[in-house]
Amino acid sequence: MYGTRLDNAHSSQDTSLYSINLINCTDVIIKNSEITTYGVGAIDSYVDYIDSLSSDTVVNYISGNVFELDEFGGNTVRFIEAGSVTVPVRLEYNSFNLNNSYTGNIAIFLSGVSAGSLRYNQIKDYNVGINLMNSSVDLFENVLSSSLTSSRLINVFSGSSILLTELNSQIFGGYNGFSNTSTKSRNINLDNSTFYTDEGHNIYRIIENDTNSEHYYGTISYEGGPQPDIYARHNCFYKGDNIDTSILLLWNGTQDPVTVIAYPMAQECSSFNNSQMQVFLSDGRINDTIYLVPGGNGGGERQSSIFN
């Protein structure tokens, strides 16, 4: 589906309904479209039986779309994979916007996705930005922000893992922006799961003067034995505009705290503040984010250029 506009209104909220329903589908492409709904979700995909994938390039691909939801407390985009053969999922250049009085809304829900890639997405003012269940996902240059109390930008549950940095010298993840501007919020919320953010150049921001908000919170997968340090170097951690780490992690099944090594932080940390993080919509419904630092001739440099 390319360049399509879908408007779907429902008289009352129904979290079981979606504008697009997919069952055991592969090679789905939904691109450069706008989906506006009232009371229902946008895309739902359920896979429980596929004999085999026809090639290594098979992927369900959601790119360059704008999702506008009103009065809805469910999932905007949901992929559930319950079979022995799973289909890779790629979501990139999408914009998730919510106008809502309901709670419990989630922008992206992934369950059983063993090869997920989220790149260049913008998610704003959801209770939960991304919810992962038994999934492995790479995140690169996404911007997640919320002004809602008790928001969770990413839930990483049930043995899931997220990659927020490079792997084997190849950039699969990193350079993401996370910003919570209300109380009792968490940037990354973990439950018996893992994350990799060392050398990732991600920006984490929570509200200042709130002892109930954390950058990382929850439990890390643990099966006994040594409890290694978790490295989170070369990222930026802020409370308001002040550099500050606020992390509360335990090894799963214990009361043992996880030691997170957040220093040294990225060289660019002192240069960034809220006014320098800009999100824009370019041609083809592509959302991107630029981080500007002062240039020598009155200009600026893009984030990625100053990281090299």
Image (spheres, helix red, strand yellow):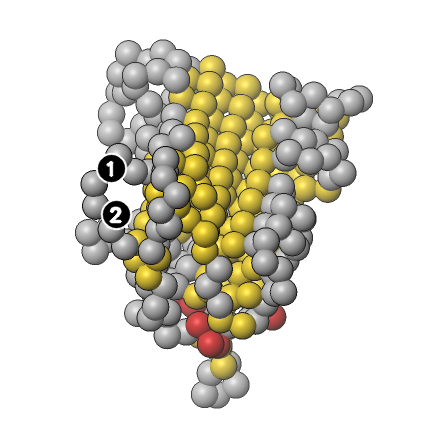
User: Quadrant of the rendered structure where residue 34 is?
Assistant: top right
Looking at the image, which residue sits at the far bottom? 297
Q: Residue 215 appears at what percent x and percent y?
A: 49, 55
What secondary structure is marked by label 2? loop
Residue 133 image offset from top left, x and y in percent: 43, 30
- Residue that appears at 49% across and 68% down: 244
Q: Which quadrant does the C terminus fall into?
A: bottom left
Question: Residue type at mark 1?
Answer: Gly
Three-letter code, disc 2: Gln
Q: Nearer the viewer, residue 125 or 207?
A: 207
Which residue is nearer to you in this view: 230 or 200? 230
Q: Which residue is mark 2?
A: 227
Quarter of the figure with residue 183: bottom right
Image: 305 above or below 160:
below
Query: How far is the residue under mark 1 from the one under mark 2?
Result: 8 Å
Query: What is the total number of numbered labels drawn onto the structure image?
Result: 2
